Image: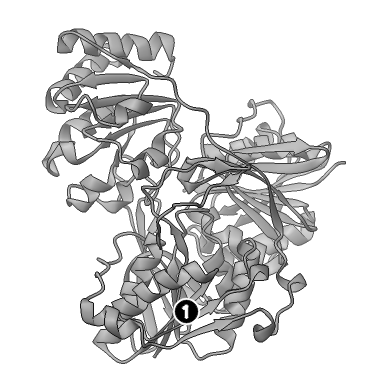
Amino acid sequence: MARDVLVIADLRGQDLRNVTLEALGGALRVAEGGRVAALAIGHGLEKAAAALFAHGATEVWLADQEALSHYQPDLYLAATEAAIAEVRPALVLLAHSAIGRDLGPMIAAAHGAGQASDVIAVDLQDGEVVYTRPIYAGKAFTRVKVKGELAVATVRPNNLPMPESGTATGEARALAFAAPSDLRTTLREVVRKTASGVDLTEAKIIVSGGRGVKSAEGFVPLRELADVLGAALGASRGACDAGYCDYAMQVGQTGKVVTPDLYIACGISGAIQHLAGMSNSKVIVAINKDPEAPIFKVADYGIVGDLFEIVPALTAELRAFLG
Amino acid sequence: MNILVCLKQTFDTETKIALQDGSIKEDGVQYVMNPYDEYAVEEAIAIKESGEATVTILTIGPARVEEAVRTALAMGADEAVIVDDPAAFGDEYTAAAVLAAVAKERPYDLILAGNQAVDDGSGQVAIRMAELLGIPHIGVVTKLTVLGNQVTAERDAEGDLEIVSAALPVLVTAQQGLNEPRYPSLIGIRKASKKPLTKLTLAELGLTPDAVAPRAQVTETFLPPAKGAGRVLQGETVLRVSELVRELRQTSKVL
């Protein structure tokens, strides 16, 4: 049975994030001939609209205003509600990102709807949509069905198949919506903290440090390795608790759960709560002095040794390859 | 000021997860207060200590959750409400409806909760609750200042930091880094056993099981496939490193 799906685009500035294209992939899989609408909220959205059409959106709605440049719950909810009224979808898909994690439950509550959060797969089973999602940070998984006229789901980056970019184009439609005049929260300031610009949850490669890094300066060789690979920098709780790095970098059950193509764990012993956050990575490399460290049990490749010797050697080797 | 703190009891994060008859095995599991909720409890108590506030803990769950509630009371919360009713143990839709019903029955200025629980990891309940109560929320907060009627918060937005303000009443969800939760003192533990703890059923909240029936239904629970043992590379550093790069390029094809 055909069902209409609305994908809420996730943008970084004016650029679509890959997770939005992956959500489109999920939408195309379950629409069964229904419309796959996309809504982009922000400012200066022409490029995003073109990418949404090229990746299979059958209609694109734009809420394009300077006031929408940054996420604000009341404004984004009003825009989303206007799009839902236009599209009347059976399913709203968002990214499980800073925006989607905040906006998704607001939409679900507004409609008394069920929500599947952080889904890693969207499939059809006997004509119904089934969501696969991690619990206990990936120590186990569940399949979930959502009852009711509207379902909401947030999609984890790097997991759903991204549709091929085609030649499709279209005329995006401006979304008419009444922005609430008195916002209940005021965004005072946005401070950019990530210098590299590679987001941990969306990174294809992550270089991560643990207590073995020994100090804030100890992250320097890891950062050099990350730079060569175009990777994001992560950390274990041990490293964060010891004050070597910011909690925003923490990977684990308390922290971010990540599923990159390549995870390089340096000086991380592999506590269960850390493994929960990264063991579903495609390929894991462990570098640790202790051959008995539990991280080696989940690693595809292990190197027993001093990370301050191994990591710079690895960086040099990669530099020779990757330039 | 009246502060409500929503709390969930969860498995300890060092727990190994196993299945029993297709569901998560709970026998012998060590339960703790959801770590993100600990930050919420600590923040509430810190606000109470810097001025004047009453801190009430709200939770849903069977008899075992009393232990987590007592911990929060021992840390310094004043009283607690537990909704102990199987019809209240549903999905995020259910939990939010039940907690909002509890909140509506009492005065509040500030509601605090963890930004997600380490078991289901959905991060829905608190935000849904704010919507049901018709109050604003500020999510994933790492610093909170309450000055008179005004709340200013720093929130973690994927590495960026946003500074957001709102007027009370407001709901705030706690992120790691907000504070350093205290351990309950012996005196705190002794006092906790005498603090008021109310147990409620859905009927006592004026709710019917139908009204809060879950929207999401779990059809299957499974464990990830066991990973085969990997290879530990041998030899001189230079050799091991070049073999690793070759493997990553040619065998795993991730570079």
**Residue B164 location in percent, x, y?**
40, 70
Please name the residue shown 30% across and 36% down the image.
A270
**Residue A212 location in percent, x, y?**
16, 36
Q: Is residue A243 above or below residue B182?
A: above
Quarter-of-image position of residue A106? bottom right
Quarter of the C terminus of chain A within the rendering:
top left
Please name the residue shown 38% across and 79% down the image.
B151
Please name the residue shown 30% across and 85% down the image.
B191
The answer to whether residue B225 is visible is yes
Quarter-of-image position of residue A160? top right
In the image, taking residue B105 as reference, residue B172 lies left or right, namely left
Q: Nearer the viewer, residue B3 or A319?
A: B3
Q: Is residue B133 above or below residue B89?
A: below
Amino acid at circle 1: Val
List the residue tagged with mark 1.
B170
In the image, taking residue B172 as reference, residue B90 lies left or right, namely right
Q: Is residue B8 above or below residue A206?
A: below
The answer to whether residue B154 is visible is no
* Chain ID, mark 1: B
**Residue B118 location in percent, x, y?**
45, 54
- Outermost residue toward the right in this view: A1
Q: Nearer the viewer, residue A28 or B119?
A: B119
SS of the residue under disc 1? strand
Q: Nearer the viewer, residue A282 or A32?
A: A282
In the image, taking residue A139 as reference, residue A321 lies left or right, namely left
